[in-house]
Amino acid sequence: MGMINLILSQSYATEEAIKVQTGAWHAIMSASPVVQLTLILLVTMSVVSWAIIFHKKKEFQKVSAENAKFLDFFWEAKSLDEIHRELRKYKESPLAEIFQSGYKELIKIVENKKNPKSQFSVSQIDNIQRVLRNSSDREMNLLENKLNFLATTGSTGPFIGLFGTVWGIMGSFQKIGATGSANLAVVAPGISEALIATAIGLLAAIPAVIFYNHFSTKLNSIDMDLAQFQSDLLNIIRRNFVLD
């Protein structure tokens, strides 16, 4: 009876030791250097992604609010000169930056004309349109800045995690070959670190994909607003400076 109790107690102790050895933290600390580097890379990508997400979220909120304020002022103003004088109040608005670029080109054309009342040529209107479009592209590029990192994390994160998974399973098979035993104590650490690599890869990729798609939708909406504003501004310029 005493021998049976001793065997059972040893069995329980062994099972408890296996549980401790296959814990997440123990698996990470005992993982091979390659898997540890993979985990560090994935964690770094995840941290940077979340930093970009919070930064872009605030940026898009500010841009939307400033654009709305500028549009209200734009349609209430009595002249383009009045709008230009108040532009400093809307420095965070891409629409204000587009207006400033178009207004500067308009002033250059007016100042270079010998007869201010003469009709604008087609090429001069095209110049203003080109300046507005270039300014819009610059503003969109600023808003798109750093979003490529989210796309990269979302597309490569699972594969980087899969690399760590494959490497961990390879380590388990190597231990089986070296010890000639396939019991849980031999294969569990390698499998555990492999699954952790997969999990962290998904944890890094999923939020990056979700918020990249979210910000892409926001960008499309802002791009439509910029295009509509360019069209409205050009119509105003044509009405006031192009004689029929």
Image: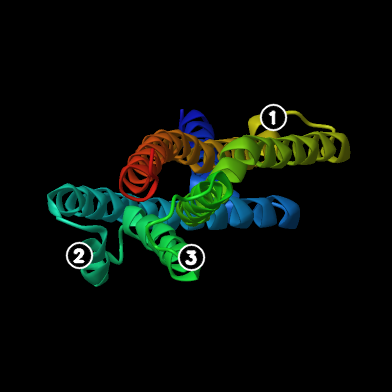
Q: Give the class, few, some or many, for how many residues have Cα within 10 Å of label 3's Cα (few <14, many ≥20).
A: few
Q: Is residue 45 visible?
A: yes
Of the image marks 1 and 2, the number of the one nearer the N terminus = 2
Marks 1,2: beta carbons within 8 A: no
Q: Is residue 194 visible?
A: no
Residue depicted at 52% across the width and 44% down the height? 17
- The quadrant in which residue 224 appears is top left
Q: Earlier in the sequence, mark 1 or mark 3?
A: 3
Please state which of the two labelled residues, at mark 1 or mark 2, is closer to the viewer. 2
Type of amino acid under label 3: Lys
Q: Disc 2 and disc 3: Cα gap in Å?
A: 22 Å
Q: Position of residue 123 (x, y in %)?
A: 58, 48
- Residue 178: image x %, image y %? 87, 40
Q: CA distance from mark 1 to mark 2?
A: 81 Å
Q: Quadrant of the C terminus?
A: top left
Q: Is residue 83 left or right of residue 213?
A: left
Circle 3 is placed at which residue position? 113
**Label 2 crowd (10 A; few <14 / some 14-19 / many >=20):** few
Q: Nearer the viewer, mark 2 or mark 3?
A: 3
Q: Amino acid at mark 2?
A: Glu
Element marked by disc 1: loop
> Where 12 sits versus 27, above or below?
above
Gap between marks 1 and 3 measured at Cα:
89 Å
- The residue beneath circle 2 is 82
Image location of residue 228, percent across then percent down: 36, 37
Residue position marked by numbered label 1 in the rendering: 183
Against 164, residue 101 (above or below) is below
Amino acid at circle 1: Asn
Left or right position of 173 against 111: right
Looking at marks 2 and 3 on the same chain, the residue that comes earlier in the sequence is marked by: 2
Q: Secondary structure at mark 3?
A: loop
Question: In the rendering, at what x and y percent does residue 234 appear?
Answer: 39, 44
